[in-house]
Amino acid sequence: MVDRSKVSHLNNFDPNEPYLVFRGRITEMHSITTGRSVRLEATFCDGTGSMTLVWFQGINWIKDYIKPNIIYNVMGKPTMFGSTLQIAHPDIEAAPASDQALPHAFLPVYHSTEKAKAKGITTKAIARMTENLLAVMPPYLPETLPQNIIAKYHLMGRTQALRNMHYPETIELWQQAVYREKFEELFYHQLDFQYSRTSRLRSSIGRIFGVVGEKFNQFYNTKLPFPLTGAQKRVIKEIRADMRSGRQMNRLLQGDVGSGKTLVALMTILIALDNNCQACLMAPTEILATQHFLNFQKMLDGLDIRVELLVGSIKASQKRKIKQQLAEGQIDILIGTHALIEKDVIFKQLGYVVIDEQHRFGVEQRAKLWAKAVVPPHILVMTATPIPRTLAMTLYADLDCSIIDELPPGRQPIQTTHGTDAHRLLLFNFMRQQIELGRQVYVVYPLINESEKSDLKDLMDGYESLSRSFPMPQYQLSIVHGQMPAEAKAYEMDRFKRGETNIMVSTTVIEVGVDVPNATVMVIENAERFGLSQLHQLRGRVGRGGGQSYCILMTKDELSRTSQQRIQTMCATTDGFAIAEADLKLRGPGDLQGLQQSGMLEMKLADLVDDEPLVCATRDEIHAILEIDPELQLPENQMLLQHISINKLLPHWDKIS
Ligand code: ADP
Ligand code: MG
């Protein structure tokens, strides 16, 4: 929005403003030919200074249009070109005789791209279109928000809002118009999700897991390796209540890295088994699935429970056997990757689905798993990426939430430091000291794009140089990256896990979930290339065994401002939620790790960071409406009912079965 009544002066204007208005005369104009290209340059003076206006296109038209001794409004953003100010392709119009005669006090500014501009779709052209459209618009458009809501929140009416979005009389009116439009956007977003959730709750039947039986109790009494934390107990209780309710559970379990989500998954899976159901656990990578599998086998050792692993890399004959036994009900717990979603994976009696590190899975994949049972299974979605409050409200409005907000006792906060190449000798010495103490070290390289050769080269060079500084046989190194065969990866992971190697050099394949308590040092190379959440995930690989752990963020010497802020945030806090908030502020919701593909965060106007109060208000309002009128039957809610775009993303069981 530009205030056309606010004219800037060339000797004193705000260079940060994207669009300014100047008023003055064109004192000189000439064409310049260089090679085959011609441009038109004009000198513009406003009495306080002068600047050059440049046109590369439409030259003849401009030459005709511009007359001497007429006052023009010239609009755009001046930039320094050499020692003179200039605007290329400014918006230009003859200034009216007096300010009062201006057609609109404000001139709208629209987003345009270089490409669109080249085709004549400039902000001014768009403004002409909206102006024309508004002129032919009927005086009153049908309202799209219920009257009671408009009254309650003092919102501007729709027609008025549309006009004032583009051509307001005052800034206040413009703000009110934008407020109303944002309100409407968030309001209906919340309605879609919350309605979908409440109608699912109402219509969905769920298996009733009435008993906590032998398997759970046996594990609890004889196998539990440590007392549960208070938060783990609370979450298990919440899940038990859902499982008994007769409705399908859809629960999101948030817990920072290392908070002990796996144990919650295991124990609630035992409840499902106690109620004669099968369960499955889906993880985003083979390494992680394999690790869960080994972990479950170890923890359930001696109990009469059959756990199997289904991942892409196992032999076809073995796969066939597993699928058959699964269908016959001989397998109790199936752990795997995306392989679990394949059509021919059929359970005899699937009652419970746990999805680990959910941000890696799209909503559609979730839905596919759900469709594997006649009666919908209970669903637990676990994520270690703390999601800022507003995002959780928006993104997971259809899920119930549990939070593990307590780490197992005895964990010392991880010490994080920042280093550059100048510190490399110190770093190597420190690694040697830790290895001498019997500890293990991760060295991680970014591999943003698995197919990018230069990334892999970084890793290989790093490995070479580490091999020289940490020679065999005194030191043993492991290396793991995405292009290795799954078996080789598993083998190397295993050696590291058993403590046979001292240093694990890897790409981010180890990012999620890998659990080696004896590892106490995490070195992250080219740390400036990682996002905050990812750094936090990586750091979470250490500090799991109770020993003091360290994270060293290695970067090049010169960092951009955001990189600097990211590194500083990491050094200052280990609180996952604080980091997620910072990430959201630095990068915006669209870039948050794993959320990109969700497509659910693409608000047209609302900003999930800045508009948090509005997000909360609309959420609470919808909640209150659905509490009183869950099926939207009351007359005042008819508009809402019509507005629901039957949720495209989440399956409704009544429709599937
Ligand atoms: P995450 O939530 O990141 O998945 P894990 O489930 O991998 O965390 O647990 C991290 C580590 O903490 C594991 O080594 C696990 O054995 C241990 N752990 C889990 N619960 C407890 C507890 N109540 N007391 C002590 N250690 C625990
Ligand atoms: Mg985990």
Image: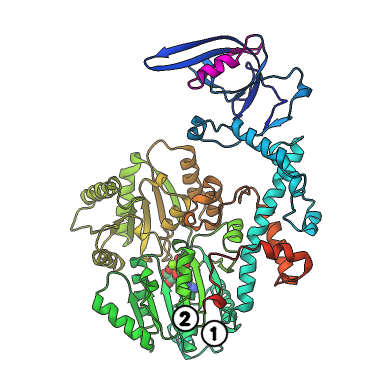
Q: Residue 50 lies in magenta, yes or no?
A: yes
Give the residue displayed 70% in from the left and 27% down from the top: 4
Q: Residue 251 location in percent, x, y?
A: 55, 71
Mark 2 or 1, closer to the camera = 2
* Kind of residue at badge 1: Arg
Q: Is residue 598 visible?
A: yes
**SS for dot 1:** loop
- In depth, the one of 516 and 77 nearer the eye is 77
Name the side, left or right, on which 448 lies relative to 178.
Answer: left
The answer to the question of whether label 2 and label 1 lie on touching residues, with beta carbons closer than 8 A, is: no
- Quarter of the image where one finds residue 98: top right
Q: Position of residue 161 (x, y in %)?
A: 73, 45
Q: Specify the quadrant that holds the N terminus.
A: top right
Residue on which the image places disc 2: 373
The residue shown at (70%, 41%) is 165
Mark 2 CB lies closer than 8 A to ligand 2: no
- Amino acid type indicated by mark 2: Ala
Seen in the picture, residue 48 relative to 154 is either above or below; the reply is above
Relative to 497, say whether 141 is above or below.
Answer: above
- Which picture quadrant has residue 70? top right
Q: Is residue 306 visible?
A: no
Magenta stretch in the rendered image: 44-68
**Nearer the N terminus, badge 2 or badge 1?**
1
Closest to the observer: 205 or 110? 110
**Between marks 2 and 1, how big is the CA–CA gap?**
11 Å
Q: Position of residue 374 (x, y in %)?
A: 49, 82
Q: Which residue is mark 1?
A: 207
Residue in front for this viewpoint, 225 or 327? 327
